[in-house]
Image: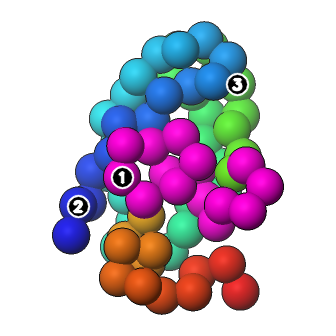
Amino acid sequence: MQLSSSITCPKCGAVTVEKMPRDACQWFYECPHCKSILTPEAGDCCVFCSYGTHPCPPTQTGQDCCS
């Protein structure tokens, strides 16, 4: 299981490596470069699934974390 992911900000293009929570989805993320608040795209459970290089740990293990 991957516990870190590189998030690419869709606003400014900055890439930041972040540690993911093991047992939860992260719904909000503030870009450290442009300060934009990112939220998941439609159909995704969290910002890591939308903007990261790896999906969140619950998704990696096949859990339904959107409910």
| Membership of 48 in magenta stretch | yes
Tag in front: 2 or 3: 2
* Mark pair 3, 1: CA separation: 21 Å
Tag in front: 3 or 1: 1
Give above or below for 41 relative to 11. Answer: below
Does label 3 or label 1 sit earlier along the sequence? Answer: 3
> What residue does disc 3 label?
36
**Residue type at tag 2:** Gln
| Element marked by disc 1 | loop
Q: Tell whether 52 sits left or right of 43.
A: left
Q: Tell whether 63 sits left or right of 37.
A: left
What is the span of residues highlighted in magenta in the rendered image?
Answer: 41-55
Residue visible at 71% across and 86% down in the picture: 67
Give above or below for 14 relative to 55. Answer: above
Q: Position of residue 17 (x, y in %)?
A: 32, 35
Residue nearest the observer in this picture, 56 or 29 = 56
Give the main secondary structure of the magenta stretch: loop
> What residue does disc 1 label?
54
Q: Tell whether 23 sits left or right of 10.
A: left
Residue visible at 49% across and 51% down in the picture: 48
Give above or below for 19 relative to 13. Answer: below
> What residue does disc 2 label?
2
- Could one spot residue 23 in this view of the protein? no
Q: Position of residue 61 (x, y in %)?
A: 35, 82
**Residue type at tag 3:** Ser
Does label 2 or label 1 sit earlier along the sequence? Answer: 2
**Residue type at tag 1:** His
| Membership of 34 in magenta stretch | no
Which residue lies most toward the left here? 1
